[in-house]
Image (cartoon, rainbow, N blue to C red):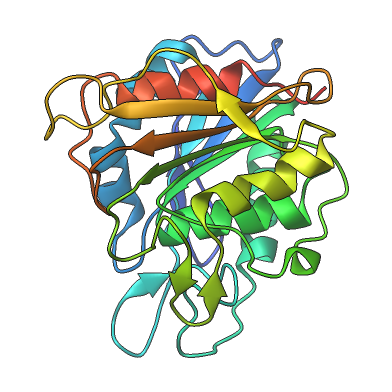
Amino acid sequence: MVTDDFTAGGDRPVTVKVPSSYDPATPTPLLVLLHGYSATGAIQDLYFGLTPVAEARGIVYAHPDGTTDTSGNQFWNATNACCDFGATGVDDVGYLLGLVDEISAKVNIDPKRIYFAGHSNGGFMSYRMACEASDRIAAIVSLAGAGYADAEACGASEPLSVLQIHGDMDATVLYAGGTLGAPHPSAAESTSYFAALAGCDVALTDGGAPLDLDSGQAGAETTVQTYANCSAGVDVELWTIIGGGHIPSLAPGFAEKLTDFLLAHPKP
């Protein structure tokens, strides 16, 4: 077992950040952050501001890169809507699960606290990971991503917690659903699949006081909705940034709110 930062990922290397509080005898949460189309892991980390929060919260943390398409843009092969536009068929699920395995072989990762989060294409990829590895992942957070338009394409086998954050004025990944490489569902439809999987009530309900997630707008502009009566230990939520676009100006505290949701939801 190692106690300092190390490199993993083979021919797609990423630095794995090990918090200074890490104790090899204590199972530790793992968070993998996935970047948006044409971005990089480093850029996504700066945007979300997760490095100092992962350190403060004692989270092993990595922000890997996807592969590059013929347009020179880095991407994740997530759903059929986004974003393997060149039809490369790259196995990003295999890469990311292999990365989790490699990290888990080097540091003491708690198998009940493995988390993914992402923006846009990274949000789509987080949903794909939830679909194909629901037996391993405790929770995901997606900002401006979406799941599968065809729910049968997901095939998740176990309930897990999901937080979708989405601006209702997003002109790229439409809040009400739209089409990129193929149709994608709305923000509410993306969450409703996982709500049904967890046996939650069908309808979204008020989840409490609004939040300030977008520093480009005055006040607390983000509504919080949740599905009631889910399986024990599972929550599915939709946070809507009213007036928010595809790349909102994230307010201070965003990274803390994201990690608060994840850490509150270990795998039941």
Write the residue at 30% across / 56% down: 170
Q: Is residue 141 above or below residue 205?
A: below
Find residue 138 and report its image quarter: top right
Write the residue at 38% across / 18% down: 256
Camera-side residue of 150 and 112: 150
Residue 195 position in % (x across, y down)? 73, 39
Q: Is residue 229 above or below residue 200?
A: above
Camera-side residue of 120 and 96: 120
Look at the image and tell me in which quarter the N terminus lies: top right
In this rendering, the count of numbered labels is 0
Write the residue at 33% across / 20% down: 211
Find residue 87 and report its image quarter: bottom right
Write the residue at 78% across / 45% down: 134
Residue 180 position in % (x across, y down)? 43, 77
Camera-side residue of 42 and 138: 138
Residue 129 position in % (x across, y down)? 66, 53
> Can residue 106 be seen?
no
Look at the image and tell me in which quarter the C terminus lies: top right
* Left or right, residue 129 beside residue 184: right
> Can residue 73 be seen?
yes
Q: Is residue 76 above or below residue 48?
A: below
Residue 95 position in % (x across, y down)? 63, 62
